[in-house]
Image (tube, coloured by chain):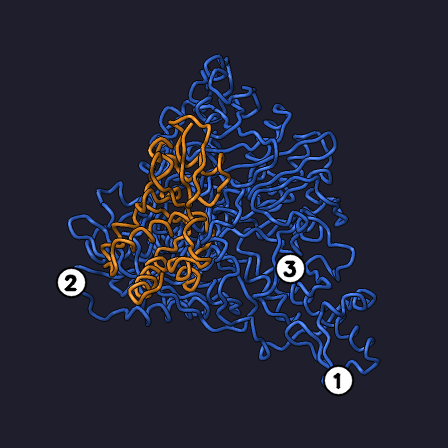
Chain colours: A blue, B orange
């Protein structure tokens, strides 16, 4: 969900000048976080050779995690990289979340963030080196203590072993290790020696998450904390015209009602009092142009725009001419609605604001950006803002906004409150709060030769640019084309000699944002549905048709073949069921899925999904399985039910009764097959999501002869489960 | 004022009687394991037990807890040991972000207190009120079956 191509020059804009000197937090006791000191710099007597590792004299190894844990498993998989080289027992390691610091920034992009399915890929080298460097220093320390040759020593399970049965734990070596020089390029293990990496490893945070001990942003408290909820305009871009707060102020527990840039905040001694206060608030809004947003009209306008030439995203050969001369021509229009992320934990942000410092507790994917935006809102310098990242109850991209919307709002509320205050969003606030996956329209056409092979492919895409107007635009928008709008379409893998992909980026008042797998959420559906249409038009099997067109793409073929084989593609199925297939590459990985679907009396049931993933070297197969299962559910949920619609500027959905999501009773059996690989590890958080919509719609076509070109499926009279 | 028994401890609380039990648990008692997800009993994140039965605490006024035993996720372990459901969850590597899991565990524990050998349909019925956006349903189902098997053999 994050840009992959931000150039290092962006570092200058987004760089924090904070250092790692830390300092003890001002006595704030955060409920459930038993060790506040973990958020600060290492204790003086610890061995801390780099920003990621601390070892105490009591032999406790602490790993500092520079990525947000939002379910994707980095809390386990990144420490695996360090523990492997450091030679420690992973299950005894303590993991703490990193503060905001340049040391924790992405090795290429500089900024500290979690997204783009980047964590393992970007930290694969650095964290192993960090572990190896610490190991080498500990070995050197032992050699120094025993006055023996380093070559005769080995590190194992948190200790150094030497000749004659000598043994010193890392804790015992802390003082000496701190005097050793940090090796700039320590030797890494050969993968054949891996004891941890590549082995299925259970999560380190499971226990905390099944006992209620894990602390999420919404759980954080500090002494004297107030709670706020904010009344926001009913249409995007609306502003406050007048406020009558009399009844709100009369609600017991309400302390104040204040206007902030995003709306009107009700500040109270508890969430429930704040919410009751907001219910009693009377605000007259100046609505503005946002009141005219209408989804049906917008889709129609997009469809009209798609008939006109757009800005070129890809041009190979002459698609127009080849189309005109083709034996068979097909064309189609595909439509997809706005989607909300709807993470289980509604947005929230606790801010404690002082004269020269600001402490923020929240779940965020965007530390560096948030620090800068919070500082600007607080009238402070970035290094005066500390962000204490907690567990995220889901991110999916929503907790990574270029303008840090929910954090900046919370800072404004804190300025008004003059007390620590946690701003909490309700589910209604979340679903109506914008920052959606954009609405998309695709006009797509292809020409086939006499044998059914595609000779021309013309794809015109219409949808809002996610990065336009943000600092990411200068890197991601080239010649007016937002790379995130066309990813998965511009780099069509199929062997078609004439390809044109064009883009229109209409503007509008509805804020949009990256949503798990970003542009692939729509291009995956369109490309994998349309290629299926071509296969059927050519009278060919959809799997075989794709295979024939992927000759130069061994990793596409690898997952496609694996999924087809494991799904028994072509073998007879229970009556009333059909299979649909899709293959799509995103975020550095390749994925293929086969869905087995029935649709008796319009009740769609997805029975089974076979998923093949090639993500390079598997670091934690358990994480990969879980992320594929999760990606399937996220994509399927959107395909079946997901839509945010607006009428008279108002979002029509508000909670899970009118924004349904997948539940247990609609969950298919998901099988995950990981392609063995020694290539560098690539993304898994997002690559599983883009394929479900197409796989299911392709199955529905095989089952019913009805081609679905707009989502969600429930709008076509289908029910689910 | 209301006397509320939570996880075996009775306390007199100065709260308005219509306050949802969820917010009394989270804010008055400081037990944050029970989560807020929707406020309308649609997502199940707030599930607690009232006299052993699963209820959605976000729509249950605290007055409904008068004279009853409230159990939250923090009170599920007994004798210093995790509940078999919690053990099974850990073994099956169920949680991802984990935010829904307190509610999932409480719903599952309530199911297994009434049904020793739940079918898939039983599991669907008992658990479809608990949403998971991370998609852990398959593992939840496996963990429920694992916990059920162990409980039938005497695990408590």
Q: Which residue is mark 3?
A: A63
Q: Is residue B68 visible?
A: yes
| Whether marks 1 and 3 lie on the same chain | yes
Expressed as whole percent of the image width and height from the top left, the position of residue A253 reads: 50, 23
First in sequence, mark 1 or 3: give its number. 3
Identify whether A504 is placed above or below A262.
below
Identify whether A377 is placed above or below A681.
above
| Whether marks 3 and 2 lie on the same chain | yes
Identify whether B115 is placed above or below A503.
below
| Whether marks 1 and 2 lie on the same chain | yes
User: How crowded is the residue under tag 2: few (<14 C-alpha within 10 Å), some, or many (20+)?
Assistant: few
Local SS, label 3: strand
Q: Which residue is mark 1?
A: A152
Nearer the observer, A613 or A272:
A272
Disc 1 chain ID: A
Whole-angstrom CA distance, mark 3 to mark 2, is: 53 Å
Whole-angstrom CA distance, mark 1 to mark 2, is: 67 Å
**CB atoms at circles 1 and 3 under 8 Å apart?**
no
Residue at 50 percent of width and 16 percent of height = A249
Viewer-nearest of discs 1 and 2: 1
Residue at 53 percent of width and 60 percent of height = A204
């Amino acid at each position: 969900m994050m840009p992959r191509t931000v150039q290092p020059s962006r570092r200058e804009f987004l760089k924090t000048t904070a250092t790692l000197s830390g300092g003890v937090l001002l006595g704030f006791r955060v409920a459930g976080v038993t060790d506040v000191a973990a958020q600060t710099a290492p204790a003086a007597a610890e061995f801390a050779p780099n920003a990621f590792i601390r070892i105490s004299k009591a032999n406790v190894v602490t790993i500092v995690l520079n990525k947000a844990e939002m379910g994707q498993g980095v809390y386990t998989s990144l420490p695996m990289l360090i523990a492997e080289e450091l030679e420690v027992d992973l299950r005894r390691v303590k993991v703490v979340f990193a503060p905001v610091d340049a040391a924790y920034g992405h090795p290429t992009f500089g900024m500290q963030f979690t997204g783009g399915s980047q964590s393992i890929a970007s930290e694969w080298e650095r964290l192993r080196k960090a572990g190896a460097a610490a190991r080498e220093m500990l070995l050197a320390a032992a050699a120094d203590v025993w006055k023996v040759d380093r070559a005769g020593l080995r590190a194992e399970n948190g200790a150094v072993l030497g000749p004659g049965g000598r043994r010193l734990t890392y804790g015992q070596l802390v003082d000496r290790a701190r005097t050793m020089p940090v090796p700039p390029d320590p030797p890494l293990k050969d993968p054949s020696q891996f004891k941890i990496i590549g082995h299925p490893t259970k999560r380190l945070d499971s226990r905390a998450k099944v006992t209620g001990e894990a602390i999420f942003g919404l759980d954080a408290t500090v002494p004297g904390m107030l709670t706020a909820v904010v009344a926001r305009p009913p249409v995007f871009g609306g502003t406050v015209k007048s406020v009558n707060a009399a009844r709100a102020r009369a609600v017991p527990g309400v302390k104040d009602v204040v206007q902030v840039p995003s709306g009107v905040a009700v500040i109270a001694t508890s969430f429930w009092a704040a919410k009751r206060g907001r219910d009693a608030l009377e605000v007259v809004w100046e609505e503005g142009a946002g009141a005219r947003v209408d989804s049906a009209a917008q889709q129609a306008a997009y469809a009209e725009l798609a008939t006109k030439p757009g800005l070129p995203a890809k041009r190979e050969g002459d698609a127009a001419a080849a189309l005109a001369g083709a034996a068979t021509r097909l064309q189609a229009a595909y439509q997809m609605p706005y989607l909300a992320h709807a993470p289980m934990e509604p947005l929230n942000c606790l801010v404690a604001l002082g004269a020269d410092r600001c402490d923020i507790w929240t779940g965020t994917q965007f530390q560096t950006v948030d620090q800068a935006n919070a500082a600007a809102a607080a009238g402070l310098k970035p290094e005066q803002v500390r962000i204490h990242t907690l567990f995220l109850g889901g991110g999916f991209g929503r907790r990574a906004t270029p303008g840090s919307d929910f954090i900046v709002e919370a800072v404004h509320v804190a300025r008004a409150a003059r007390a620590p205050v946690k701003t909490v969003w309700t589910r209604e606030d979340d679903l109506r709060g914008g920052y959606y996956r954009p609405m998309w329209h695709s006009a797509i056409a292809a020409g086939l030769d006499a044998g059914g092979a595609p000779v021309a492919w013309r794809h015109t895409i219409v949808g809002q640019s996610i990065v336009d107007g943000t600092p990411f635009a200068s890197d991601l928008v080239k010649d007016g084309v937002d790379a995130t709008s066309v990813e998965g379409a511009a780099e069509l893998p199929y062997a078609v000699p004439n390809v044109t992909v064009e883009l229109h980026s209409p503007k509008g008042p509805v804020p949009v944002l990256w949503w798990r797998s970003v542009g692939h959420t729509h291009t995956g559906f369109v490309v994998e549905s349309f290629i299926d249409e071509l296969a059927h038009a050519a009278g060919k099997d959809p799997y075989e048709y794709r295979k024939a067109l992927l000759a130069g793409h061994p990793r596409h073929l690898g997952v496609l073949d694996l999924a087809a084989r494991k799904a028994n593609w072509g073998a007879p199925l229970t009556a009333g069921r059909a299979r649909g297939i899709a293959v799509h590459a995103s975020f550095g990985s390749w994925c293929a899925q086969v869905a087995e679907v029935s649709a008796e009396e319009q009740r769609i049931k997805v029975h089974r999904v076979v998923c093949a993933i090639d993500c390079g070297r598997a670091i934690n197969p358990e994480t990969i399985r879980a992320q594929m299962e999760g990606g399937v559910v996220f994509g399927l949920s959107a395909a079946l039910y997901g839509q945010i619609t607006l009428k008279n500027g108002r979002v029509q959905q508000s909670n899970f009764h009118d924004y349904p999501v997948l539940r247990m009773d609609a969950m298919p059996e998901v099988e995950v097959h990981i392609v063995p690989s020694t290539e560098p590890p690539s993304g898994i958080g997002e690559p599983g999501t883009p394929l479900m919509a197409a796989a299911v719609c392709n199955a529905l076509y095989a089952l019913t002869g009805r081609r679905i070109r707009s989502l969600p499926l429930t709008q076509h009279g289908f029910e689910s489960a | 004022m209301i006397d509320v028994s939570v996880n075996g401890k009775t306390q007199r609380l100065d709260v308005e009687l219509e306050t949802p039990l969820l917010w009394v648990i989270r804010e008055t008692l400081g037990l944050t394991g029970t989560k807020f997800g929707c406020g309308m009993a649609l997502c199940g994140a707030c599930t607690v037990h009232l006299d052993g039965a699963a209820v959605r605490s976000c729509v249950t006024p605290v007055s409904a807890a008068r004279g009853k035993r409230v159990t939250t996720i923090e009170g599920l372990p007994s004798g210093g040991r995790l509940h078999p459901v919690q053990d099974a969850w850990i073994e099956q590597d169920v949680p991802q972000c984990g935010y829904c899991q307190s509610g999932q565990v409480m719903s599952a524990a309530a199911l297994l207190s009434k049904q020793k050998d739940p079918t898939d349909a039983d599991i669907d019925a008992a658990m479809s009120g608990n949403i998971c956006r991370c998609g852990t349903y398959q593992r939840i189902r496996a963990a429920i079956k694992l916990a059920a098997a162990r409980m039938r053999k005497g695990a408590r």
